[in-house]
Amino acid sequence: MYAYDEIDRTFLNERVSEFRDQVQRRLSGELTEDEFKSLRLMNGVYLQLHAYMFRVAIPYGTLSSRQLRRMAHVARKYDRGYGHFTTRQNIQYNWIKLSELPDAMEDLAEVGIHAIQTSGNCVRNITTDQWAGVAPEEIEDPRIWAEVLRQYTTLHPEFSFLPRKFKIAITAADHDRAAIAIHDVGLRMLRNDNGELGFEVHVGGGLGRTPFIGKVIKPFVHAHDIISYVEAILRVYNQYGRRDNIYKARIKILVHELGAETFARDVEAEWAEIRESALRIDDAMVEDIRSRFTYPVYEKLADEPAELVKAKEDPRFAAWLQNSVARHREAGYAIVTLSLKPVGGPPGDATAEQMDAIADLADRYSFGEIRVGHEQNLALPHVAQRDLPALWRALDKIGVATPNVNLVSDIIACPGLDYCSLANARAIPIAQELTKRFADHELARMIGKLHVNISGCINACGHHHVGHIGILGVEKNGEEFYQITIGGRADEKATLGTLIGPAVPYNDVADVVEDVVEAYLALRARPSELFIDTVKRLGVEPFKERVYATR
């Protein structure tokens, strides 16, 4: 956990006071909605279909139990009793009254939580692997470097009014759980031949109307130079990025139109001017930030304790253990993923009661720490293996032990037309229906790893482009239709999915997904061949034939 200092706390309190004044002026009519818009956006407040939406940052996806309880309090007091966890390690409240927003912000600020730069044309919440600091294959805890960049980019005067929003993600493991390739800047930690720590820099990733996978423009930047190099990227973008066309304003368009090589040369030229400036990070600065992170004092435990071996005799526990529990870097400990994808439920939602209960369980079993993942699930990162049976029983009681992590019903979905004024079609009901179709966990395990992503419009908040099966809502003559893509992925082998054919009506979507899955089961070379590998081997034609044969 990172501990805010007095400067941080003062800053958050001042920001709340400032926003309270802005809200009062809006409510009094002194500010019009157009005048208020830029102010509220820089504080994470959107005007959606039915009400204001409040997006709260969870920097690098790390929460304390105290913070999660406060989020539950906000859900209960100011909203309708729940919050929605997003793909970028935020939580959203969809029903808060504008007049009560400053009070909600003040309550959150008391525990070091804020919504600064969770929207607007600025550097957004910097994200990373939800297993950061505990993943066995990790080079170093990437949250330290995410915090370095968070501090530098927050309210940066030059980069608070960029051509468009800007997203940075960091990974430090071979398997990319942070989806760095679909971010404006993606940083992969590595060591060079001399053992020095640094980053491979990807630029120009992003989805939406014109999707791109990020390009590597620098194979290695020393960790001490990462601020200056990111600043050079932002300077080039700020200078040349389009401000005359919102659809062409993202850095991905600039990289595409200039070409990655030309863009990289411009960044190198800018970097040469600032590389040896005060932006260079020294060891003392890194160690100061590192010292603000607290880590558990682990016991010396053996793997596979007797309690765990005995509990495996229960097939329900064994299924959950296989699906939702991962190796930890410390012997005798485990990482536990909590599924926020119950059968028939909206993906990513958690009630206030669930959040309170998870906070209690984190105190009891995970040193008071919770993580938020890109896949809209939560995790307890420090669980002793001996405690797994008791934890499973407790999680099952509150509905977050569904053993479907990374399976077909572990669906990523945006709020869609149920909430969003930009959406063309619903996303949540599609996800709910699919979880019912694939509620049989034995069937889901037989299918294997399969990610379904759903977006309610071309803005792609559900990341449909990189779903193994991607579903995009479109509007045709006032009716909801859905385009289906297959073969996308967001990990270290990131690629965009391929459209399989014409859009299908709302009532056919779940049937189409079932057809695609049945085709995969018939076509895979062996039971261990994953869906994504079958699509790569055969292409989309066999799936297209299955889906449209009777349509």
Image (cartoon, rainbow, N blue to C red):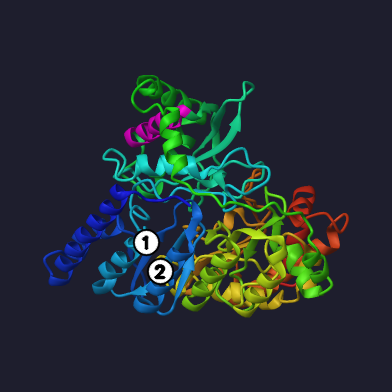
Is 299 located above or below residue 212 in the figure? below
Foreground residue among 524 and 28: 28
Foreground residue among 19 and 446: 19
- Residue lying at 55% horizontally and 63% vertically, measured from the top left: 376
Q: In the image, residue 27 lies at what x, y percent? A: 17, 71
Residue 298 is one of the magenta-drawn residues: no
Task: Please identify the quadrant where the C terminus is shown.
Answer: bottom right
Q: In the image, residue 146 lies at what x, y percent? A: 46, 43
Tags 1 and 2 in contact by the CB under 8 Å rule?
yes
Label 2: which secondary element: helix
Q: Amino acid at mark 1?
A: Val
- Residue with the mark numbered 2: 70
- Residue with the mark numbered 1: 111
Q: Amino acid at mark 2?
A: Arg
Q: From which residue to which does the magenta span run? A: 224-239
- Residue lying at 53% horizontally and 59% vertically, measured from the top left: 369
Label 1: which secondary element: loop
Q: In the image, residue 328 lies at what x, y percent? A: 68, 52
Foreground residue among 312 and 302: 302
